Image (tube, grey):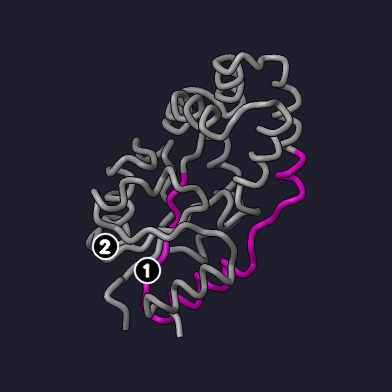
Amino acid sequence: MSKYKAVGFDYGGVVFGEPTKKIMQHIRDHIGVTQEEWKRAWWQHNHKMNKGSITYNDVIKLVLHDLGKDEFYEYVTKTQLEAEQKQSISRDILDLADDLRRNGYKVGILSNMDKAGYHKIKALGLGKHFDVMDFSCNIGAMKPEPGAFLRLAHDLSVDIRELVFIDDNDKPLETAEEVGFKPILFENFNQLKSVLQDLNLLT
């Protein structure tokens, strides 16, 4: 049995669709900005969406304005929408969540999400696979803020040091050492399964 008692999953790029960094790399290359430039502008504004005050597309508009790339707004939103329409919930991840629950572990989702995204996800019926689904627009905290992870651990009824959290982006995991949870940077399903086996969460 592992020393950990719960596993948290990011939604976009882990539960749903491919790792989002692949799509964003394509977009950054097309509009001519570096990863660091995009990340700096993105994290300057996305908290407004994640805590419910503006929409995702509003954030894109602000980010592109800061980067001096306003003319790419339609391209970016269209590209992301087309990518989303081709993606789907990962059956492998749902099966993994079910296996973890059968083995006695708590599982939850923690995602930075606006209200519109939250309502879409709520309608998917994922509650039968996860014990808890926490979204930033509802809990008043967003990754990588310590409060977001502490809220997930509380809702899963575990100590923060008993929580493993999986994300496809390294930024939300940067407070792991400070907060106390075990971070896993998601690359693909087989890599994730191997890491969970190393942590004695899977056999």
**Looking at the image, which residue is at 73% across and 43% down?**
83
**Looking at the image, which residue is at 62% across and 27% down?**
33
Where disc 2 sits, the SS reads: loop
The amino acid beneath tag 1 is Lys
189 displayed left or right of 74:
left
Q: Pinpoint residue 11: horizontal percent, then vertical percent.
A: 53, 51
CB under 8 Å between discs 1 and 2: yes
106 displayed left or right of 84:
left
Quick one: 2 or 85, which is closer to the camera? Answer: 2
The amino acid beneath tag 2 is Ser
**Looking at the image, which residue is at 22% across and 62% down?**
159
201 displayed left or right of 189:
left
In the rendered view, would you say 180 is above or below 203? above
Is residue 193 within the magenta segment? no
Quick one: 120 or 61, which is closer to the camera? Answer: 61
Q: Earlier in the sequence, mark 1 or mark 2?
A: 1
To which residue does mark 1 refer? 106
Where disc 1 sits, the SS reads: strand
The N terminus sits in image quarter: bottom left
Q: Residues within 10 Å of mark 2 (few under 14, many from 20)?
A: few
Q: Which residues lie in the magenta part?
A: 82-111
To which residue does mark 2 refer? 157
Is residue 107 within the magenta segment? yes
